[in-house]
Image: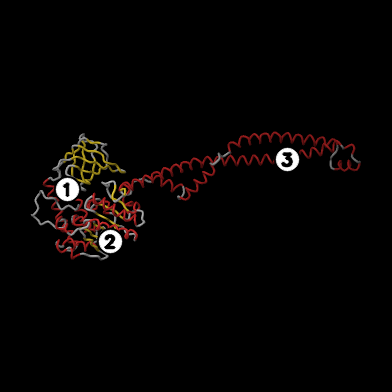
Amino acid sequence: MTATELIESWITLLEAERDRLAHTGQDSLVMASYGRLVGTTGGLHLYEFVVPADASLRIDLPVSVIPADEADTTEGIVLRYTGKSLLVQLVDGLGSEVPSVTLVPDETGLVSTAVARLKEVLAKPDLYHLGPTERLAVLLQLPAGEVERFSSAASIFTTLWSDDRALRRQQLGNLATELIRANKRILLISPDHDACDEMVGTVGRTVKAGGLNYRTWITRYELPLASQAAGLELHELGFEAQMHQFYAKSQGDKASLKHKYDRFRELTPFLSRKEAKQKDLDEVRLLEWRLVTHMRELQVRMADAQKTLKDFENLPLFQRLALQAVGKNAESLTQYCALYQGQMDQLDKELDAAKARIQQLVPEAAVPRGNRAEFEELKEQIAKLGGTKKVRELLAAEENPNRQAFIQNRRLVAATPGRVASDPLFSRVRFDVLMVDDAPKIAAPSLLAAASLVRERIVVSGDLRDIAAAGRWAMPVAGTRTASQPAPLPIA
């Protein structure tokens, strides 16, 4: 069968399983006697619940958590189930300790989501790439004994078969480092969250040894269950932690920008008023200078008139006749002195008014030290951002975290196949390479859903002995599975 035909077959089986779950009511309630908060990262909370040993819960299964008082109901995802202990990732906190809660699993919804994703792959061939998936489809249909002969090292499909798990993971880490250097976007999937944590640690250590900043290029989707792996702090690689840190810095930058913009708006009218007062001060000072100049001219004239009047009787006859010819005699010189004195008295009044105005304007026009330089710096920064209109748009923009844009900036995204097949975020992002850790332990529908997201290459690793032991690739035959057997869900 081709990849399209294989996907259609699995869609048919999953739809039948969905109908069976809907009719038999497999989504039974699970009572947890105790719960505690393990950790909080960003907007997600990791809780551990104590559940009965007979509870049947899968990883990546969506659940609703209802407290005893039926208040603050929240949604979550099962990350680990170990018989009596259940780790659930919740979107809302329930406190540090929870006395008892009711867990409502939504297995039918998970199957429906997987069916919808596979149908979307077939319905939108322009958005999904089935080139590398064709080679994977051939592998999934081979009998367990013939898979070893299918080993491939081609550029579009590569297999890494070995019974040494550490060796396989180191080979994936080396390959991931090369692909990151080549600017390829990688989707790395592991069967469960514990294996995903270990794989992320191995890849991160290899990338770090290669001289690359692993915190920048690698992200672990969902909350890591382990604190460390391969000597690396996994909380630094968690998608939610990275995104929360990025948007916290963004919020800080926005608050800083708002403070600068508010300060700019405060200084703009303040300095504008100061400039108007300074302009008035300059005009009054100019008037004062003109009055003083005129006063000096009058003082010089009056001094000349008084000197001439004092020496008038002693002047030679011809000089007195010359002065009288231009209208200057003792009587007229006295009149000139009185005229000059009246003008100087008027100028004194005007100078007093000008000085009083100057004394009033000097403090009003004074700019505190540093305000002018601060304003010029703020003006330059706002101009670099595109002006005040652009800054207002930036401040008015909503701070809704864009998960798609953030995850597309990472070169390697590590996740479980269940999250890739059911999370709507993965339907909107595309990758260049798919790397599969312990592929025989992952259900065929999950592998097909993940493979449809890659454009160029698929790398499959695992132990050949697990293919027959796990039986995750074999399509169930109609009528051979009882109601108690697990459904072929697209999860590990």
State how far apart marks 3 and 2 are (Cα). 90 Å
Q: For mark 2, does the 10 Å Cα neighbourhood hold few (<14), some (14 to 19), or many (20 or more) residues?
A: many
Residue 314, given in percent of the width and then of the height, sits at 90, 37
Q: Nearer the viewer, residue 170 or 88?
A: 170
- The residue at the far right in this view is 317
Q: Secondary structure at mark 1?
A: helix
Q: Nearer the viewer, residue 387 or 489?
A: 489
Q: Which mark is residue 285?
A: none
- Type of the residue with mark 1: Thr
Task: Give the residue displayed 69% in from the left and 41% down from the top.
Answer: 290
Question: Which comes sooner in the sequence, label 1 or label 3?
Answer: 1
Q: Secondary structure at mark 3?
A: helix
Task: Specify the color scheme.
Answer: secondary structure
Q: Is residue 325 left or right of residue 100?
A: right
Q: Is residue 315 left or right of residue 266?
A: right
Q: Quadrant of the N terminus?
A: bottom left
Name the mark nearer the viewer: 1 or 3. 1
Residue 348, given in percent of the width and then of the height, sits at 71, 34
State how far apart marks 1 and 3 are (Cα). 101 Å
The residue to which callout 3 is attached is 294
Q: For mark 1, does the 10 Å Cα neighbourhood hold few (<14), some (14 to 19), or many (20 or more) residues?
A: many
Name the mark nearer the viewer: 2 or 1. 2
Q: Which mark is residue 455?
A: 2
Name the mark nearer the viewer: 3 or 2. 2
- Type of the residue with mark 2: Arg
The residue to which callout 1 is attached is 108
Question: Which comes sooner in the sequence, label 3 or label 2?
Answer: 3
